[in-house]
């Protein structure tokens, strides 16, 4: 029996992943998870408790104020977990700018500062803020914290973070930030436990999901990331384009007469694999589709990923291992094989049997670099941050 519970909220652009953690021996241990997909109709709470999975229809609607919905969600979760023991809640925040260099307790002041960064992450930041405000309304005395995706990348050199634009814009925050930091933080820590021989060396981590990016680490610290100023940057994603010539944007809003709203919608929701294929933004669908458009989308994806890996390797000055993580990276052997094939010039050679099994090590004995698969767990990092801040609060003398 756990003494207390922590609940984490990982709000994406259209879903919220909820983690339930029991505190045992001073460490957060996951005891369950849940997901609400805001794009589904009707809304459903999907609960996973060990091997058991339960789907609960929700009456409340998704709205700017999520209090009613989250009240229903918490009530449903109470039937499965002892939420009366909940002592704290942790939230994933995509953008912390240069203001937050670590996880932070949520106060009126920190929430205001997070809100001020919304213009830098218009797709994700509002979702997290809606969740924070709903939980503060429902549990006003509950200790809550924020963990930031950008924090992990603050170890990058200033030159890496700079864009070739006027200096005053850089000074006003127009720079490369990098994202998926909670995932990279987790995988870097898992490397130390599972593959200590390479953990301190030159490694590229490929976070490949519906949102996707690459991060070059050395000594467990971020040195470079494919995503820069926004979550649109870098490699192609499910519905986002990745790197795009800025002249394309000028062309869209100039000669083609597109509005900013239309361009934003195209970039976030109609580009990437979906835009190229015209079929789907899901690699599973594209792998099953035999059309030339589906093949072209996958070829472009793996071409851009391998090319960006090459750029990061140049910055690192070499490569000892490539680690795949996130939904596609963890579960799509064909995509991993296509990327490895394009990296033969680096000495990458994949072991087909190990790759099909999603094994920890999928490189063959002939490979000059290690190829690995490590599942990520962003909620675990949020829970650890939350518990550490809670313990600090409890140990602080009363004012």
Image (cartoon, rainbow, N blue to C red):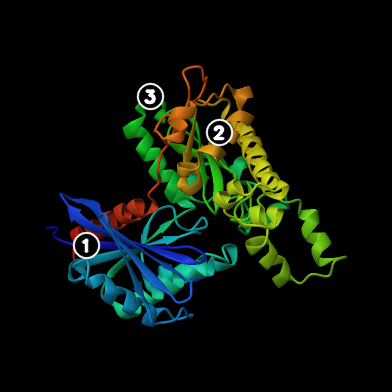
Q: Nearer the viewer, residue 375 or 23?
A: 375
Q: Residues within 10 Å of mark 1 (few under 14, many from 20)?
A: many
Question: Which quadrant of the rendered structure holds the N terminus?
Answer: bottom left
> Marks 2 and 1, Cα distance to the nearest angstrom?
41 Å
Marks 3 and 2: in contact by CB < 8 Å?
no
Residue 268 locus on image (x, y percent): 63, 62
Q: Secondary structure at mark 1?
A: strand
Mark 2 or 1: the one toward you:
2
Residue 5, numbered circle = 1
Residue 236, numbered circle = none
> Marks 2 and 3, Cα distance to the nearest angstrom?
24 Å
Residue 93 locus on image (x, y percent): 45, 61
Q: Secondary structure at mark 2?
A: helix
Residue 197, numbered circle = 3
Question: Which quadrant of the rendered structure holds the C terminus?
Answer: bottom left
Residue 253 locus on image (x, y percent): 80, 66
Residue 333 locus on image (x, y percent): 50, 38
Query: Sequence order check: which comes first, mark 2 or mark 1?
Result: 1
Against 352, residue 54 (above or below) is: below
């Amino acid at each position: 029996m756990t003494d207390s519970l922590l609940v984490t909220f990982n709000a994406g652009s259209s879903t919220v992943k909820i983690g339930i953690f029991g505190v045992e021996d001073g460490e957060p241990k996951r005891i369950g998870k849940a997901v609400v997909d805001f794009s589904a109709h009707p809304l459903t709470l999907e609960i996973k408790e060990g091997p058991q999975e339960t789907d609960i229809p929700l009456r409340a609607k998704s709205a700017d104020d999520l209090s009613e919905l989250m009240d229903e969600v918490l009530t449903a979760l109470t039937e499965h977990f002892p939420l009366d023991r909940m002592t704290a809640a942790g939230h994933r925040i995509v953008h912390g700018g240069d203001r937050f260099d670590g996880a932070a307790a949520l106060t009126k002041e920190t929430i205001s500062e997070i809100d001020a960064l919304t213009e830098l992450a218009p797709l994700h930041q509002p979702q997290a803020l809606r969740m924070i405000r709903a939980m503060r309304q429902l549990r006003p005395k509950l200790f809550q914290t924020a963990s930031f995706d950008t924090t992990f990348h603050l170890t990058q050199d200033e030159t890496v973070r700079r864009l070739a634009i006027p200096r005053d814009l850089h000074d006003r925050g127009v720079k490369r930030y990098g994202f998926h930091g909670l995932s990279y933080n987790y995988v870097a820590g898992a490397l130390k436990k599972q593959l200590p021989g390479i953990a301190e060396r030159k490694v590229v981590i490929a976070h490949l999901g519906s949102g996707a990016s690459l991060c070059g680490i050395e000594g467990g610290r971020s040195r470079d990331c494919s995503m820069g100023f926004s979550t649109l940057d870098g490699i192609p994603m499910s519905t986002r384009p990745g790197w795009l010539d800025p002249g394309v944007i000028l062309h869209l809003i100039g000669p083609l007469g597109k509005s900013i709203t239309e361009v934003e919608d195209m970039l976030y929701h109609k580009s990437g694999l979906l835009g190229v294929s015209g079929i789907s933004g899901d690699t599973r669908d594209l792998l099953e589709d035999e059309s030339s458009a589906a093949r072209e989308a996958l070829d472009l994806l793996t071409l851009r990923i391998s090319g960006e890996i090459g750029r990061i390797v140049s910055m690192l000055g070499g490569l000892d291992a490539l680690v795949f993580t996130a939904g596609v990276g963890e579960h799509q052997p064909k995509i991993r094989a296509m990327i490895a094939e394009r990296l033969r010039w680096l000495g990458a050679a994949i072991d087909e049997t190990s790759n099909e099994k999603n094994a920890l090590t999928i490189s063959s004995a002939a490979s000059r670099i290690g190829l690995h698969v490590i599942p990520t767990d962003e909620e675990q990092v949020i829970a650890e941050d939350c518990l550490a801040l809670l313990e600090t609060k409890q140990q602080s003398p009363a004012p």
